Image: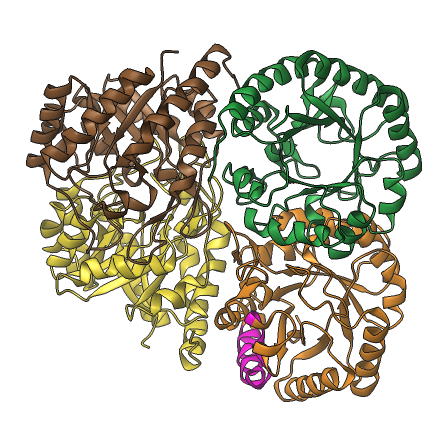
Chain colours: A yellow, B orange, C green, D brown
Amino acid sequence: DRELVLIAGPCQLESADHAEMIAGRLVEICATTGARLIFKASFDKANRSSLSGKRGVGIDAGLKILDGVRASFGVPVLTDVHIPDQCADVATVVDVLQIPAFLCRQTDLLLAAGRTGAAVNIKKGQFLAPWDMDNVAEKVASTGNDRILLTERGTSFGYNTLVADMRSLPRMAQTGYPVIMDATHSVQQPGGLGGATGGQREFAPVMARAAVSLGIAGVFIETHEDPDNAPSDGPNMIPLDRMEGLIASLMDFDRLAKADPIRI
Amino acid sequence: DRELVLIAGPCQLESADHAEMIAGRLVEICATTGARLIFKASFDKANRSSLSGKRGVGIDAGLKILDGVRASFGVPVLTDVHIPDQCADVATVVDVLQIPAFLCRQTDLLLAAGRTGAAVNIKKGQFLAPWDMDNVAEKVASTGNDRILLTERGTSFGYNTLVADMRSLPRMAQTGYPVIMDATHSVQQPGGLGGATGGQREFAPVMARAAVSLGIAGVFIETHEDPDNAPSDGPNMIPLDRMEGLIASLMDFDRLAKADPIRI
Amino acid sequence: DRELVLIAGPCQLESADHAEMIAGRLVEICATTGARLIFKASFDKANRSSLSGKRGVGIDAGLKILDGVRASFGVPVLTDVHIPDQCADVATVVDVLQIPAFLCRQTDLLLAAGRTGAAVNIKKGQFLAPWDMDNVAEKVASTGNDRILLTERGTSFGYNTLVADMRSLPRMAQTGYPVIMDATHSVQQPGGLGGATGGQREFAPVMARAAVSLGIAGVFIETHEDPDNAPSDGPNMIPLDRMEGLIASLMDFDRLAKADPIRI
Amino acid sequence: DRELVLIAGPCQLESADHAEMIAGRLVEICATTGARLIFKASFDKANRSSLSGKRGVGIDAGLKILDGVRASFGVPVLTDVHIPDQCADVATVVDVLQIPAFLCRQTDLLLAAGRTGAAVNIKKGQFLAPWDMDNVAEKVASTGNDRILLTERGTSFGYNTLVADMRSLPRMAQTGYPVIMDATHSVQQPGGLGGATGGQREFAPVMARAAVSLGIAGVFIETHEDPDNAPSDGPNMIPLDRMEGLIASLMDFDRLAKADPIRI
């Protein structure tokens, strides 16, 4: 029951300067608040709502940027993988491979990620129940790699809406693996803008606080200095200048929650 | 932003002795923990899953018991009403009239409850969105009575399952009325036992804590000294002997939440 | 496996002339197409989204109008009841008492309706599974009245949306009671217009045809000569001048379905 | 509005003999009933619920079997692809590349499939609304390939359950692409058996008939001579010996529906 992990960063990598600016600020915030940082950013948005959405800088440029962030700030970095062949290369640079929610049942991807020996953060599919993640995690664990994290990021709830079921967090924790709450994706409105995904940014702190109060391992929050002009996920990202207040507040709830564990 | 209200009691009134035993214990717990108690119990379970479920002691015997609890312990009492004609009589004894979730759109019942001048706690229907409660509350407010509480008790999520959406709490709070989290009904599994409603008692503290961390006005928790043998809602009630620990814990989160308000 | 029943009429009674105009047209349509008509209209919209929605002509005026339709056209009539006390009076005029979906678990209402000896059409609550209706029907049947109809009108599916699950129809038919598809309410968008319920009128024929193809007893369709100016449910009612084509088409599917029964 | 297409076959390829036995029977059934056959089987079940589920014969053996079926019976064949690199190879043998539902937003897979020039059948993700498929189809169409089919296979509805929304069929048809109803996957209960997916086989004919009555292009039905002992999807497959009766019945509804088109 260590201090809360903060997995944070921009939705997608834009440039080395941009990544380092955000990482630098997050490092400061974590130093101040006591959260443990994992820097997150994607090199490829492989499942955009429409073809017109920006894909990102690509794997080569992306890994170079992530390697730079890692070296400059001494923080672990996380990025998502989309096909099995990417896993080994990505793991040469990245500390945590992330399995996107839509791909969380793709056996070969899970096995390839597990075999790298890197930590693997699996997002729970919007179409899965919390208990379905037992089998998902077992696929990774079958490779002998038990450095697994499980992330709640919302469940389909009618059309173009997600709901975050708080029961999911203690239920997934029964696996024994650390559980993360993705506070910014769980307030997405998939397809809600027609050609793009909408979001309810104002509810991300609500999701984060409710989840942290349950004593989870970490929280996942995408952030950007100018979300309304970000290349993706703007409607649900938290403005960078509001992160310090948010994380400081979450740390208070984290300390209280970890001093008073809740069991199901 | 006063101390957390605890609306608690057995699902249904069984006898004067039973009500007083539970009320007495809850009074002690609130004295110790600082929660503000409203004693809750139903005189009639008017919408049981099946005809074989016990209905309760009836309105006359029920009001007498509630009056006794009120007099003996000096606590406000709450009970639910089912048809407009009951409201005036019930309000002669009861401090808070409760509108059951299935009935939260019945205009005449809302108006009759409002006209008594008593406080009115409206459970959000399992079939409504949080913002739909604006119009529901307005029906009561149209009587000139603004002593309204709004309660989240879960939303339909597929068959025989509810989900409690934490966004509902700050959204309903935008009405300006106090918002209550019903921690025991939101973990029901309606119809889940065939002829009766099932429940996941183990998740009630999870729901309560997540909600209280958001700075709500109160929490609604049904309790019984022997839930497995209670005449109704046993699968989701909290054992009476676990209430003190639960409420004490919730008060810690309540204090932290109210010192650090969250806004949407 | 007799010819399809058509339960149809305006959402709410507006005047005797209006009711007779619509009833007259529906009688002609059923004569032409072979459907068996039950005229439906409500005297009170007891659960409008907001207080500003029109309630209707009231029980006395409403029953008089329904009695007139019955006498003038020799068709059975159906209307909904909201509290137990209404049932006996309504049954003096009306052939089928309808239990609104929100009220389908109110035991006293079901018993009072059953005791009249009139047929009772129970709308499945938006919050219930098809199999939950077994217990609901049993409440009515316990009065010795087995003239029961069960109606699918959509299930909650996220916020402000319903979905009609076709599995519901054969599953409810396992009770042995006739099953009706409510094609116009199942395409409602409850609360979807803020202060009123929206709807997707264009999908009502889709719901009707899919359901009739499964060999159900009847279809429920609200209609109005000018839906956009109707006092309630305009967004989902079918224009009266499109009813003949719709019913004629449904009768073709009804004949085919009843010649080729589907069993689960 | 040509005759109904039947996309059918076993969930997974087991052997050449097995595939030819089933294909042969389906060819006979289609000759008798007038349906147009596309033979379907998977060479790899890439997203099993658990690691213990059988994966299949693999791409090389699978394509050889599919090529044999194609040659022996002169029927088009369909199989699913999971990563972009498979598309070109698979398209050398297969007439229709199928995009699995979980993968329907993976841009690179859609583009790679489109670029083969083969027809592409895209299953709508359980997490998508019907209108979200406009953007999905556009990804394939951007390659210059408009030989696209869109398939409804159910939408997440609470946990471990799907619901098939009939509105989806005419809404997806607004794209101008042929729409297919997957009658056997839409009655799955994902994860419903703990380590495997359950199903409600008895409802597959219900789904098929309701959908065909709306005048869709085709129906997708997995079948096996002994579903209870099939290596995957047994709980929802239709026994082979019941296919002739089912398809004959569906053809009656198809003829009626296509003579009487429904428009939204």
Q: Which quadrant is the N terminus of chain A positioned in?
A: bottom left
The residue that appears at 76% across and 81% down in the rendered structure is: B15
Q: Which quadrant is the C terminus of chain A positioned in?
A: bottom left
Q: Nearer the viewer, residue B159 or C55?
A: B159
Q: Position of residue A252 (x, y in %)?
A: 45, 73
The residue that appears at 73% across and 78% down in the rendered structure is: B14
Q: Is residue D251 left or right of residue C174?
A: left
Span of residues in magenta: B235-256
Q: Position of residue D101 (x, y in %)?
A: 31, 37
Q: Position of residue A63 (x, y in %)?
A: 15, 48
Q: Is residue A23 magenta?
A: no
Is residue C3 visible to us here? yes
Q: Quadrant of residue D244?
A: top left
Q: Nearer the viewer, residue D236 or A62?
A: D236
The residue that appears at 37% across and 54% down in the rendered structure is: D192
Q: Nearer the viewer, residue C83 or D238?
A: D238
